[in-house]
Amino acid sequence: DTAVSQTPKYLVTQMGNDKSIKCEQNLGHDTMYWYKQDSKKFLKIMFSYNNKELIINETVPNRFSPKSPDKAHLNLHINSLELGDSAVYFCASRLSGNSPLHFGNGTRLTVT
Amino acid sequence: AQSVAQPEDQVNVAEGNPLTVKCTYSVSGNPYLFWYVQYPNRGLQFLLKYITGDNLVKGSYGFEAEFNKSQTSFHLKKPSALVSDSALYFCAVRDYNTDKLIFGTGTRLQVFP
């Protein structure tokens, strides 16, 4: 069973559209994250939630809105998609403290 | 601010030879350091971490890392490389104050048969 699962795996859409990426973890972790990996493989944190509460909100355009209906889910909704949003988006979760992050397999978003 | 640097974009090594992937860190306070590996089209996988204790940390798949406080380094090592070790490796540091895990720029390891 996949511990952190993201859907969809691939997402191709046109500029201006609105899209969502879903993430679920079955590890019982308290904290969930969204990371963005660009074409040069740089990884940057976008958001984190702890037990449904927003903890980290980096300088991400407000077109990006995370939603956590419960502590096992953290979805990412993106409005008015732009070409520069093309990247791989990773969901991750962590139990607490210095426990390691567990990553999903990513969602490759391509905006045309 | 906490940060890590990976000075090499790519490391090439022959199968069976020892490998080292370099990482240096800059932190205020105690460093919490991690190594992750990313295979193509996959998410990152945790290899090992240093929080406190022994400077030599052993992790998954035969990897180990040496914490060196005087050189502010946390290099990843393996005594004998495998072709299957070819992947992208990320060093990371936990910013205790903000609870962010901050990643280095990654090093591509290529192991040749």
Image: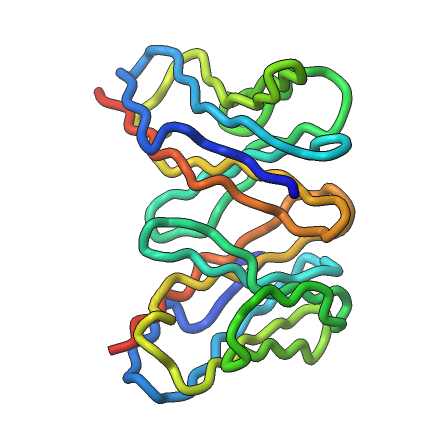
Task: Give the x, y percent position of residue A97.
Answer: 77, 46
Residue that extends furthest to the left in the rendered view of this protein: B113
Residue B84 seen in this snapshot = no
Quadrant of the rendered image containing residue A69: bottom right
Task: Give the x, y percent position of residue B54.
Answer: 72, 16
Residue B35 seen in this snapshot = yes
Decide: is B113 above or below A42: above
Decide: is A1 above or below B23: below
Residue at the (65%, 62%) spot, across then down: A32
For residue A105, side relative to residue B70 (left or right) = left
Task: Give the x, y percent position of residue A105.
Answer: 45, 57
Decide: is B112 above or below A30: above
| Placement of the N terminus of chain B among the 4 image quadrants | top right
Decide: is A16 above or below A111: below
For residue B73, side relative to residue B1 (left or right) = left
Quadrant of the rendered image containing residue A112: bottom left
For residue A28, side relative to residue B68 (left or right) = right
Task: Give the x, y percent position of residue A33.
Answer: 61, 61
